Amino acid sequence: MPQLDTNKTWILAGPTASGKTALALALAQEVDMEIISVDSALIYRGMDIGTAKPTAEEQAQVPHHLIDILDPLESYSAARFVADAERLMADIRQRGKTPLLVGGTMLYIKALMEGLDDMPAADPAVRQQLDERMAQEGPQGLHQQLQQVDPTTAARLAPGDSQRIQRALEVWYTTGRPLSAFHSQKDAAALQAKQDQTVLISLEPQERSWLHERIALRYRLMMEQGFVDEVLRLRARGDLHLNLPSMRCVGYRQVWEALDAGLDLNQTDVRARVMEQGIAATRQLAKRQITWLRSMPWRRALACDQGVSVSDVLALLG
């Protein structure tokens, strides 16, 4: 069995549908690892199909962490992820195994690598006002205002990223300063030391069309597996809504909005239209994930559309 430096932080990242789950399972079994999920959707219970959550059988093959830890009514943060991940990594190492962080929530990876800035606390009154505006104007309307008051943050956020757009405006209204002003200058030496102790394996397609086909295939498969019924069960609870981070997850939002509009998803044409909206949103997410990964020159990239095996990963590490 190959031996890896357990003191290093091992991360397997990549855009959605790039093959992270299968490769992580194979690698973890080969090297005696435990998997820590780096995914802001897998944390929620009852959200299995739409998140492409590892099956019970897959989770039984290798110990998994940070999956099914919250109810969809709850919120999670990058700060909480860092605390949970660091605690879990220490526990896994103490048991003589190697932790492997796997996922595509780049904000979590960034927070783990670079630390967190001191951010102002949430203001309930301001948040309520922005909730009302979001309902009236939609994320695009608020994104236009963000372009005026904080063009730096607006440039890195998609116009439909309602949660982060709203948070950025909340910071501006609360402090009079743009969110980008709180991104402190990191100590270059400390960042370099952190990078030296981290192995970031990045799955990136050489041909974007390959990933687009995989995303479309997976979304169609999810619909066949009962994704709409899963969303209906969540709606039937009566306490969930689109302002929650859980329900804003890609895929869930599109189905939820269609149901809010009274559309009949049993109709073939309606179902196809909603499915294409979900596929388009997922492709946009993948584009942002790839852009983030390619901004990190120290990553170790593998062409996932060429077929990646455990031996390829181990050869890269050697």
Image (cartoon, grey):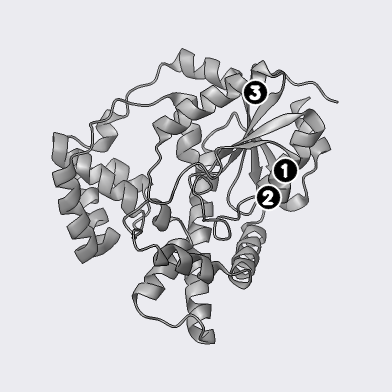
Say which residue label 3 marks: 92
Left or right for 250, reference 7: left
Say which residue label 1 marks: 60
Mark 1 crowdedness (10 Å alpha carbons): few <14, some 14-19, many ≥20: few
Marks 1 and 2, how far apart in space?
6 Å
Q: As shown in the figure, which amino acid type bears the numbered disc 3?
A: Ile
- Residue at 51 percent across and 44 percent down: it is 43
Pointers 1 and 2 in contact (C-beta within 8 Å): yes
Pointers 2 and 3 in contact (C-beta within 8 Å): no
Q: Earlier in the sequence, mark 3 or mark 1?
A: 1
Residue 1, image x and y in percent? 86, 26
Residue 78, image x and y in percent? 42, 35
Q: As shown in the figure, which amino acid type bears the numbered disc 1?
A: Ala
Depth order, front residue of 199/97: 97
Depth order, front residue of 109/315: 109
- Residue at 57 percent across and 32 percent down: it is 297
The residue mark sitting in front, 3 or 1, is: 1
Give SS at disc 2: helix
Say which residue label 2 marks: 56
Mark 3 crowdedness (10 Å alpha carbons): few <14, some 14-19, many ≥20: some
Pointers 3 and 1 in contact (C-beta within 8 Å): no
Instruction: Using the image, determine if residue 220 lies above or below residue 157.
Output: below
The residue mark sitting in front, 2 or 3, is: 2
Residue with the most extreme right position: 1
- Residue at 18 percent across and 59 percent down: it is 133
Marks 3 and 1, how far apart in space?
17 Å
Give SS at disc 3: helix
The quarter holding residue 66 reads top right
Residue 275, image x and y in percent? 52, 72
Left or right for 115, reference 141: right
Q: Earlier in the sequence, mark 2 or mark 3?
A: 2
The C terminus - image quarter = top right
